[in-house]
Amino acid sequence: MRRILLTYIAPSIAMMLAVVTCVLLAQWQWHIGFRNQTQVLASASTEIQTFADVSTAEQWLPRTSIGARTRVRGHLLNARTFRTAARPSAGAMLPWVVTPLRLADGSVVTVVRGAGGPAVSPGEVTITGRMQPSEDSPAVGVWQPAAPELSTSRLVNRWTSDVIRDGYLVDESSSTLIRGVTATPRFTAAPSGHINWRNIAYACQWLLFALFALFVWWRQVAPAPEGNNYPHGNT
């Protein structure tokens, strides 16, 4: 019984698990490869979404939140304000003024206040704007500078004592006298018919792994050829 268990049953169970796993992974990659990609569509909607629905602390900014108009309340940390290198602003190349905004839960939202503008008085403020992805994000159609100063990873290193939310908010409220910064329009899904051949290759690779698992299983459980069963004793 022990010999049957080790020779047939255990390898068969392992083979089935390996094959099912490989087939499921292949199906997943195949689906991604043929799934219609998304492209950027400008949305003229002025609807303001709840900030909790747009951004979650310690999680990546969802693609559906890129360009979403939202409103958030907190304290601007003026002492940590910095200016970026020159970047597109109202047809010119100007530095952006960036200030962290601390929320009630202790997390920090990066706020782009515009290209210039005076310091904001200390105290609680309400800011309305559009969420943008981290500048090291692979999001389609987002302008990316040579030095991604507004990447989440770089901001985490700059403000090491804070929980930095992914992405940044382009302020559009009049209270901060923002000038010359245009937010990326909202992302919405639209079919493009593009095939991702890399994912198709991954799917084929997983199918090859499944076939290899079947081959190993067959070599393990297949009976040895009769020619290899040499008789014992004198010849």
Image (spheres, rainbow, N blue to C red):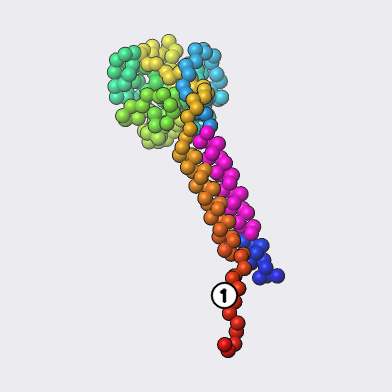
Q: Residue furthest bottom?
A: 234
Q: Is residue 203 above or below residue 73?
A: below
Looking at the image, can residue 117 be seen? no
Looking at the image, can residue 4 be seen? yes
Where does label 1 land, which residue?
228
Does the magenta stretch mainly form a helix, a strand or a loop? helix
The quarter in which the N terminus is drawn is bottom right
Where's residue 187, x and y in %?
49, 22
- Tell me which corner region of the image, top left, top right, bottom left or bottom right, holds residue 24: top right
- Which of 30 and 118 lies nearest the eye of the viewer? 30
Is 15 included in the stretch rendered in magenta? yes
For label 1, the crowd category at 10 Å Cα-Cα, with few meaning under 14, some 14 to 19 and many 20 or more, is: few
Where's residue 138, x and y in %?
42, 31
Residue lying at 39% horizontally and 16% vertically, measured from the top left = 182
- Label count reads 1
Is 145 included in the stretch rendered in magenta? no
Side of 111 relative to 235 (left or right): left
Q: Is residue 185 above or below residue 32?
A: above
Q: Secondary structure at mark 1?
A: helix
- Which of 234 and 68 lies nearest the eye of the viewer? 234
Side of 174 relative to 115 (left or right): right
Residue lying at 59% horizontally and 70% vertically, measured from the top left = 224
Give the residues in magenta: 12-34
Residue lying at 39% horizontally and 18% vertically, measured from the top left = 113
Where's residue 95, x and y in %?
31, 20
- Which of 205 and 135 lies nearest the eye of the viewer? 205
Where's residue 186, x and y in %?
48, 20
Identity, as a three-letter code, of the amino acid under mark 1: Asn
Residue lying at 52% horizontally and 43% vertically, measured from the top left = 203
The quarter in which the C terminus is drawn is bottom right
